[in-house]
Image (cartoon, helix red, strand yellow):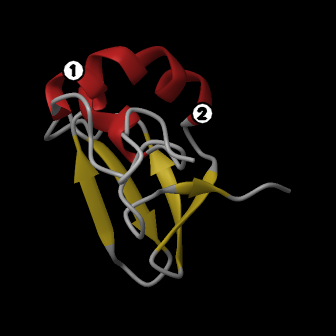
Amino acid sequence: MKRYRDKSGKLTKTIEELAAETRADATAYYIDGARYLYAGREYVLHLCDKETELVCFESADGYKIYTTPEMLGTFLPDVADEGLEIVRVEI
């Protein structure tokens, strides 16, 4: 079961509250240079894009996903909506 959800799967907190409460978990889970899966595509995480100051997940074929460091926790597998999880690839 996903965290921060009621029995019907609806969020029990705002996105801002989720982001704040999951920040420490995200810092432990999302590691610079590690590989992650999103929507069937593999990405490498770059924790800070020097130009934008955003977190960047970059695929080998040029796809990029940007987010702020503060919002990373909302993509954790046990927090994000189904299909929006960014999951670490275990080696």
Mark 1 and mark 2 in contact? Answer it, CB < 8 Å: no
Judged left or right of residue 74, residue 27 is right
The residue at 50%/45% (across/down) is 2
Residue 80 spot, x, y in % from top left: 39, 50
Above/below status of 44 relative to 28: below
Above/below status of 75 relative to 24: below
The residue at 29%/29% (across/down) is 69
Sort mark 2 into few (<14), some (14-19) or many (20+) by Cα contacts within 10 Å: some
Q: Residue 60 carries which label?
A: none
User: What element does badge 2 sit on?
Assistant: helix
Q: Pointer 2: what residue? A: 29
> Residue 31: which quarter of the image?
top right
Residue 37 spot, x, y in % from top left: 56, 67
Q: Can residue 29 be seen in this view?
A: yes
Residue 16 spot, x, y in % from top left: 15, 25
Q: Pointer 1: what residue? A: 17
Judged left or right of residue 73, residue 54 is left
User: What element does badge 1 sit on?
Assistant: helix
Label 1 and label 2: CA atoms lie apart by 19 Å
- Asked whether 10 or 42 is in front, the reply is 10
